[in-house]
Image (tube, rainbow, N blue to C red):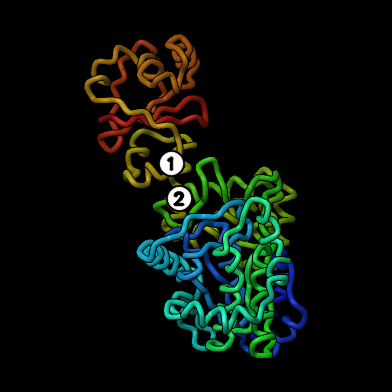
Amino acid sequence: MSKNFVEELQWRGMIHDMTPGVEEYMNEQVTPAYIGFDPTSDSLHIGSLVQIMTLVHLQRAGHKPVALVGGATGMVGDPSGKSAERNLLSADILEKNLKGIRAQLEKFLDFDSGETSAEIVNNYDWFKNYNFLDFIREVGKHITVNYMMAKESVQKRLETGLSFTEFSYQLIQGYDFLWLYENKGCKVQLGGSDQWGNIVTGTELIRRKVQGEAFAITTPLIKKADGTKFGKTEGGNVWLDPEKTSPYKFYQYWLNASDEDAENYIRIFTLKSREEIESLITEHRENPGSRLLQKTLAEDVTVRAHSRDDYDTAIEASRILFGKSTTDELDKLDEKTLLGVLQGIPQIAIDQETLNSCENVCVLLSDLSDNQIFSSRGEAKRMIKQGGVSLNKSKLQDPDARPEVRLLQDKYILAQKGKKNFYLFIVE
């Protein structure tokens, strides 16, 4: 055993609650412990990264991580933290989602380390042949309705309506724990604090049905210092899938963290030691303008979630986009990287003939951009004269000049207004 798992999570601020005796139990032997992952998408997002890191720390402490991907529970829907019932998924969509999640978990966990090898299980495997009548007789009779009704996740939904399908979710998750307890020797379940009710239903079912002892540890739900939701941007979730969130955007999310959030995130999302982190925080506080914490955090997480090459590309793309660069340097970015870097900026479609006949750059930047860049030709003219406008990183000098620029990747023009406002023309 290389580390005390509970102590490691505690100093990192990753424990919200735990059942008595769990630390002593885990200090005595190699322990399989599991976390369930929601398969409603073919990619996890960084909200799931807290649970992934919990499994990483578990394995580093000499225990066996088990990732349960809920092929069966994904067909039901967990009411925890939900204000309305979600759509149920078909078997084909679930299978596609399961494959995507497996591939992402394999980036973080070691699946070939002997006794502590990570394992992925799918609860559909043990539910697919389970008869409903058998389930309510063998499982349902051990948990009372009063016990289930007392759960916060149920109470919150009683006024708006809770289907029997969702009400039964805690029984199904409880049975997952029982099945893993009996078949995998798994006596510990981990999860977010919103899962506490479902998890302890499992420990209670194990106690009542097989007179066994099982344990629970939950992590706090991560919130940003400004009160906004962690893992969300104006464009939605920050995904681990590079096709859904480009490595550049992923890197930028961490880089743009506030100082307060960065101090929290670097404990949770990196594997750096306590001494390293305390040293980084001290150095950062002495010179916050250097953004040492954010840069260290962004590098660490991007490399592990994606790759060193993706991180290097993000750094180079940032330099080209926001630094002093040339059209030639911008043109070196391949189309996928270029669009990844520019993901989320306004896009303006224009045909080649209209571009060729455009009388001057002011018309392009006002009329032909549907006034997204400038509200009038006069406004465009004034800012061009002030030196605040460029096309493909070449600063415009003459507002009366025609927009004769080399297209990036034979189809794009990048317009920049000021330091941080970008617009992408797509020439068709």
Comparing 140 with 261, the one in front is 140
Residue on which the image places disc 1 = 343
Residue 24 drawn at (x, y percent): 74, 85
Q: Residues within 10 Å of mark 1 (few under 14, many from 20)?
A: some
Q: Residue at x 65, y 73 (%)?
A: 199
Residue on which the image places disc 2 = 245
Q: Does residue 157 lie above or below 322 as drawn? A: below
Q: Secondary structure at mark 1?
A: loop
Residue 197 drawn at (x, y percent): 68, 68
Q: Does residue 167 lie above or below 384 as drawn? A: below
| Residue type highlighted by circle 2 | Thr
Comparing 68 with 427, the one in front is 68
Q: Residues within 10 Å of mark 2 (few under 14, many from 20)?
A: some
Q: Which mark is residue 426?
A: none
Residue 239 drawn at (x, y percent): 48, 54
Mark earlier in primary sequence (2, 1)? 2
